[in-house]
Image (cartoon, rainbow, N blue to C red):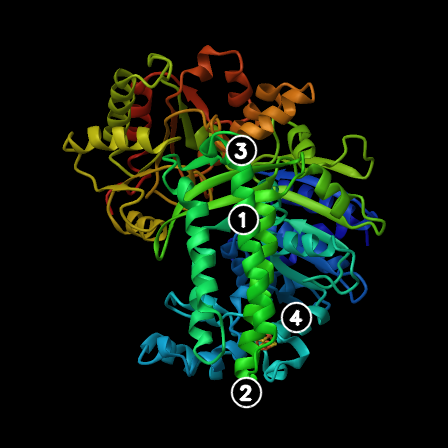
C-alpha cells in the first residue's frame, strides 16, 4: 500500500480514526506531517524536521507511521520533554492508535530509574529511625505490595523522602540483589526489551546517549533502537546540555554525610572525616551562596585565577577525603547482614561518584564547556549549584547520534521549531548538517481560523521598552485597558519578575473586579487550577507560563506579552554561547539571540488559541516589533491573526464576540 493511501485510510475523510474517535476532523496538515515522518522512517538514517502548528494532531501523525514500521527488529523510541505528554501518549494516544491499527504492537513506558521504588532500600528503611511512625512511609510500604509498576507517579501525594527509597545506580546490586526477581525497575527494563515502541522522555533518552559514550557494550539505559521521534523537540538543546553536563549542589555532600552518619552507627567509621567533608564543602560553596545573583560565572564570584585555583584545590582535597571514606567503607565488616552490606556498598559508590562529579564541576577543562553557578533552595535552606555545561551540544550530538556508524533515523517535531521560515537555527544548534541529503524539512500551519478568531494587537503609541519607571507605568496602564475590554480571562506573560511585580502592583490598585493571580503565590499547577476555577481570572506569570499550559475555551481570551523574549544577556550560559558564536565569526544577534526569541514569542502566542472554537486577542506591547527592522522577522512568522493597532478595535472585537464567549461562568 502506498504511503498516501494508508495514511488516508487512517487519517482521511472516511478513515478509521473518524469512525473510532468522536469529533475527529481530518486535516490535510496532519496527513502532510505523517507522510514526512513516514518517509524518514522508510529511509535509513532519515531525519525529518517538522513544525506543526497548534491543532494539527501531531501525536497521531507520528504514531501511525511508528505503528507501521515498528517490529521486533525495528524498535522506535518516542521521546517527549514532559512527563505530562509521556503520560498522555501512554494513557490516551497510543491506545487510540493501537485500537485502529490491525496488527498488535507492543509499547512500553520507560522512565528514569529514580521514578521506581527500590525494594532493597525500602526494606532497609523499615528499620531506620526516620521512618518510625511516618504515616506516609506506611502508605508506601502498603503500596509496595499492591503496585504493578512501583512508579512514583501512582502515589497521590509527594513523599519528601522519596530519594531514600527510590532505585538509584549507586545502591543497586542488579542480579545480586535479593529482590531482583520482583524489582520494579528491572521488570520495566525487561518489558522494554520486548517492546517495539518505547515511550521515554528527553532526559532519559539523552542520559542513555551519555552513558553509551563510554563505548562499553552493556553501557546503556535503553534497549537498542532504530528510530527516535522527538516530540517537543524545541527542548532538545537544553535537555542535551543538562544530560551531558554536571550540576553539583552545595546540598549534596551534607546529605551524603547525613546518610553515612546514620549507617555509621552500625560500623567502625572515622566520624571526624565525615565532619571535615561537610565543613570543607560548606567553605567551598560559601562564597557562591552570598554572590547575590541568581546565576553567575564562577570566576566572577571568586574574582581571579588564584581564587579559582584555590577552589579547585579545595575540591581536590574533598575528593581525597571522599576517596578515603570509600576505602574505609570497603573494609567494613558488615557481620553477615545483607541489608547493611547493600547499604555500605551503595554509600561507597555514592562517595566515588560525588568525588568524580565534584572534580569535574570545579576542575573540568574543556573549551566547549562553561562553569557557572545558580542559586536555589533545598530542604535545608539556600543552596548553590555549580554547573559544568556544554556551550554547544552540536558536536556531542553529532558524535553520539547523528553520525553513528549504524544509522539511527529521527523525527524532530514541535509547534515551535522553525525560525525565519526554516530550520537553519535548530540544525545549527543541534549539529544536523545543512548538507545532509537525508534530512527533510516540513512546516505546516495550524488548521484553526486565526484571521477570523484571533486579533494581534500592537499598540504602536507606546514608547520603546526601557527600564524607566515611566515605561512600566504606561505598559501597565495599557494592560489594564485590555483587561477591562476582555473582562479578565487573561494571561499576562512577562520576561522578568521585576516587570511582572511592577505591573501587578499597579493593576491591584485599580480595583479591577477580577481575581488576580501571581506566579510565586502558590505552586504553578495550583495557580493554573485556580485560574480555571475562578471566574474571569487574570494570571501574571514569567517564563514557565509561556509554554506547556493548555487552557482551551473562553477562560483564556486574552494573552498580553510585555516584551520580546530575548534571553537575559547576563545569563552565563547565554553569554558563553554568544562568545562562542562571535569567536567563530558568527553574528550572535541575527543567528542566535533573535531566532531564540522568535521561538519563545511563538510559544507565548500559542497559549491563546487551543481549539477551533477558541477566540481572543494576543497583545504584544513591545513596539520594537513595529519600529525596528527586525520586528518583521517576528511578525511574519506568527500565526496569521488579524493585526490591529487601535484599542477601540480590540473593544469592538470583544463586544462582537460576547455572544459567542461565555465570559461569565
Ligand atoms: S535490583 Fe536494584 S533497584 Fe531493584 S530492588 Fe534491587 S537494588 Fe533496588
**Label ID, residue 282:** none
Badge 3 crowding class, 10 Å Cα cut-off, few under 14, some 14 to 19, many 20 or more, is few
Q: CA distance from mark 2 to mark 3?
A: 48 Å
**Mark 3 or mark 4: which is in front?**
3
Q: Which disc, if any, is residue 315?
A: 1
Q: Nearer the viewer, residue 582 or 369?
A: 369
Q: Is residue 285 left or right of residue 14?
A: left
Confirm whether residue 170 shows in the render. Answer: no
The residue carrying mark 1 has its beta carbon less than 8 Å from ligand 1: no
Neighbour tally class for label 1: few under 14, some 14-19, many 20 plus, Cα within 10 Å: many
Q: Residue 302's x, y, as percent?
A: 47, 34
The image shows residue 70, relative to residue 595, as above or below, that is below
Can residue 470 be seen here? The reply is yes
Read off the residue under disc 4: 189
Residue 337 disc label: 2
- Quarter of the rendering containing residue 348: bottom right
Dot 2 alpha-carbon crowd within 10 angstroms: few under 14, some 14 to 19, many 20 or more: few
Q: Secondary structure at mark 2?
A: loop
Q: Nearer the viewer, residue 21 or 561?
A: 561
Q: Is residue 591 left or right of residue 74?
A: left
Residue 372 location (% of width, % of height): 52, 38
Which callout, 1 or 4, points at the residue further toward the start of the chain?
A: 4
Label ID, residue 306? 3
Mark 4 to mark 2: distance in Å?
28 Å
For numbered disc 1, what is the local secondary structure?
helix
Q: CA distance from mark 3 to mark 1?
A: 14 Å
Amino acid at each position: 500500500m502506498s504511503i498516501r493511501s494508508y495514511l488516508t485510510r487512517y487519517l482521511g475523510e472516511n478513515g478509521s480514526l473518524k469512525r473510532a474517535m468522536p469529533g475527529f476532523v481530518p486535516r490535510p496538515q496532519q496527513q502532510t506531517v505523517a507522510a514526512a515522518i513516514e518517509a524518514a522512517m522508510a529511509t535509513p538514517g532519515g531525519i525529518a524536521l517538522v513544525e506543526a502548528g497548534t491543532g494539527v494532531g501531531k501525536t497521531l501523525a507520528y504514531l501511525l507511521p511508528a505503528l507501521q514500521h515498528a517490529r521486533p527488529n525495528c524498535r522506535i523510541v518516542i521521546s517527549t520533554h514532559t512527563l505530562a505528554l509521556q503520560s498522555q501518549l501512554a494513557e490516551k494516544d497510543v491506545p487510540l492508535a493501537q485500537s485502529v491499527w490491525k496488527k498488535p504492537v507492543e509499547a512500553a513506558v520507560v522512565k528514569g530509574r529514580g521514578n521506581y521504588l527500590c525494594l532493597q532500600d525500602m526494606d532497609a528503611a523499615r528499620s531506620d529511625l526516620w521512618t518510625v511512625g511516618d504515616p506516609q512511609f506506611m502508605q508506601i510500604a502498603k503500596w509496595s505490595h499492591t503496585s504493578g509498576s512501583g512508579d512514583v507517579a501512582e502515589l497521590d501525594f509527594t513523599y519528601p523522602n522519596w530519594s531514600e527509597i527510590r532505585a538509584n545506580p549507586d545502591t543497586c546490586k542488579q542480579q545480586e540483589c535479593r529482590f531482583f526477581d520482583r524489582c520494579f525497575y528491572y521488570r520495566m527494563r525487561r518489558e522494554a526489551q520486548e517492546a517495539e515502541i518505547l515511550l521515554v522522555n528527553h532526559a532519559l533518552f539523552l542520559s542513555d546517549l551519555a552513558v553509551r559514550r563510554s563505548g562499553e557494550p552493556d553501557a546503556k539505559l535503553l534497549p537498542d533502537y532504530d528510530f527516535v521521534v522527538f516530540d517537543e523537540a524545541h527542548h532538545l538543546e537544553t535537555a542535551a546540555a543538562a544530560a551531558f553536563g554536571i550540576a553539583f549542589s552545595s546540598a549534596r555532600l551534607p546529605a551524603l554525610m547525613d546518610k553515612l552518619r546514620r549507617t555509621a552507627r552500625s560500623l567502625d567509621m572515622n566520624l571526624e572525616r565525615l565532619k571535615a567533608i561537610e565543613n570543607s564543602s560548606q567553605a567551598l560553596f560559601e562564597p557562591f551562596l552570598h554572590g547575590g545573583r541568581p546565576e553567575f560565572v564562577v570566576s566572577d564570584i571568586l574574582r581571579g585565577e588564584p581564587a579559582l585555583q584555590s577552589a579547585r584545590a579545595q575540591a581536590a582535597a574533598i575528593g581525597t577525603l571522599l576517596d578515603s571514606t570509600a576505602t574505609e567503607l570497603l573494609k567494613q565488616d558488615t557481620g553477615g547482614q545483607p541489608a547493611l552490606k547493600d547499604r555500605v556498598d551503595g554509600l561507597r559508590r555514592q562517595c566515588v561518584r560525588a568525588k568524580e562529579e565534584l572534580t569535574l564541576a570545579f576542575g573540568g577543562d574543556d573549551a566547549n564547556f562553561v562553569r557557572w553557578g545558580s542559586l536555589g533552595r533545598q530542604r535545608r535552606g539556600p543552596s548553590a549549584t555549580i554547573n559544568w555545561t556544554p556551550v554547544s551540544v552540536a558536536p556531542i550530538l553529532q558524535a553520539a547520534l547523528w553520525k553513528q556508524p549504524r544509522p539511527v533515523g529521527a523525527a524532530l517535531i514541535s509547534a515551535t521549531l522553525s525560525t525565519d521560515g526554516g530550520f537553519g537555527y535548530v540544525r545549527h544548534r543541534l549539529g544536523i548538517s545543512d548538507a545532509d541529503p537525508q534530512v527533510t524539512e516540513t512546516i505546516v500551519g495550524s488548521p484553526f481560523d486565526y484571521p477570523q478568531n484571533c486579533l494581534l494587537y500592537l499598540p504602536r503609541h507606546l514608547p520603546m521598552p526601557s527600564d524607566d519607571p515611566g515605561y512600566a507605568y504606561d505598559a501597565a496602564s495599557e494592560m489594564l485597558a485590555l483587561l477591562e475590554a476582555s473582562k479578565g480571562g487573561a494571561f499576562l506573560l512577562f520576561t522578568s519578575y521585576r516587570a511582572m511585580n511592577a505591573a501587578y502592583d499597579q493593576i491591584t490598585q485599580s480595583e479591577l473586579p477580577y481575581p488576580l493571580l501571581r506566579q510565586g503565590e502558590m505552586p504553578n499547577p495550583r495557580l493554573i487550577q485556580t485560574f480555571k476555577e475562578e471566574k474571569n481570572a487574570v494570571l501574571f506569570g514569567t517564563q514557565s507560563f509561556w509554554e506547556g499550559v493548555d487552557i482551551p475555551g473562553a477562560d483564556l481570551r486574552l494573552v498580553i506579552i510585555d516584551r520580546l523574549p530575548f534571553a537575559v544577556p547576563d545569563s552565563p550560559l547565554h553569554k558563553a554561547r554568544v562568545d562562542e558564536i562571535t569567536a567563530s565569526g558568527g553574528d550572535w544577534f541575527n543567528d542566535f539571540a533573535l531566532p531564540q526569541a522568535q521561538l519563545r514569542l511563538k510559544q507565548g502566542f500559542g497559549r491563546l488559541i487551543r481549539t477551533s472554537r477558541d477566540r481572543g486577542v494576543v497583545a504584544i506591547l513591545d513596539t520594537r516589533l513595529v519600529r525596528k527592522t527586525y520586528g518583521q522577522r517576528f511578525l511574519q512568522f506568527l500565526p496569521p491573526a488579524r493585526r490591529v493597532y487601535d484599542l477601540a478595535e480590540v473593544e469592538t472585537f470583544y463586544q462582537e464576540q460576547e455572544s459567542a464567549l461565555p465570559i461569565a461562568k
